[in-house]
Amino acid sequence: MSIKIVGLIAVTLFSITVFTGMIGIDSNGKLSNHNQIERQKLIEKLEKKEDSFGLTLRERARLAKAKGEGEVTLPQGETATWVEFGSFNATLSHCTAVIARPIAMRTYISKDDNIGTCYKFKSVEVLSEAPPSKYPFNSANIFPELLPVREDEFVLCRSGGTVEIDGVKLNAIERRFPPLVLTKKYLVFSEFSKDKKMAALCYGGTSALVINENGTMDTLNGRQNNLKSAVDAQFSNSIEQLRNAFRNRAHVEK
């Protein structure tokens, strides 16, 4: 009799194991199909909110994670409306032209839930220097990771960048201003603070050109703009010709 009972218990346990395996119990003892239903509800809830009101960055990360995605690209327009480049004479009256190389960066989430990036540049050569900007810069706001800012360095911040939230990478790509490359040199037109530690772009994403190894220049996103057209027409897209022209201009003004 005892052998029959033991056998019955064994068969019963085997049946339970097979049954629970069929319906799917996870390591926490919860039904996996229940988890899938809850995850689908979360996806539908967040997608509905996205269509109606938009999502915060943290909610975007939750939605991506629920879908099993580890990285999301977020189209991000410029956070300000910029005046377009007009002429070099007008620009150099209030903008400093400098050849510089980014040597460090710090991406952050702003108070209004946008992604931004601050770059620390090392100045290679100042081609034309304008008076300090009237913009109220505050050097105390420089991220500790970018300190110290030495005499030949400055910090410039722009919208866009990549942050990670709860294991999900969020990439905010600004159409006219893709990420800068730390190993490259750039021609940058910026307004500087009085202490020259901080700078602001004069024309947003069209304020800078990347300098190629052969001395030519390209826009940051590969699309022609007013600044690049002027460089092509007046200086044959040559950084050397532009440098000489700016030096002569400075000499005449003195």
Image (spheres, rainbow, N blue to C red):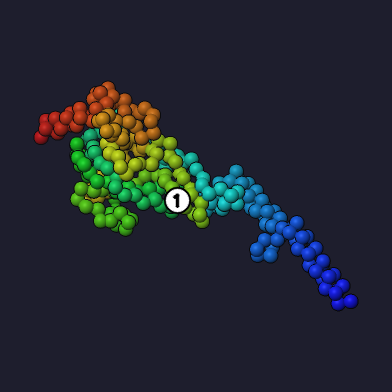
Classify mark 1: residues with Cα within 10 Å, few (<14), some (14-19) or many (20+): some
Image side of residue 98 versus residue 119, left or right: left
Q: Residue at x 32, y 44 (%)?
A: 182
- Residues 74 and 30: in front is 30
In the image as oriented, which residue stretches furthest toward the front? 3
Image side of residue 27 versus residue 172, left or right: right
x, y percent for residue 253 = 12, 33
x, y percent for residue 8 = 85, 70
x, y percent for residue 151 = 19, 50
- Which residue in the structure is indicated by mark 1? 163
Q: Relative to 249, is 145 above or below?
A: below
x, y percent for residue 5 = 86, 74
Per the image, label 1 sits on a secondary structure element best described as strand
Q: Relative to 75, is 231 above or below?
A: above
Q: Residue at x 25, y 30 (%)?
A: 215
- Residues 41 and 230: in front is 41
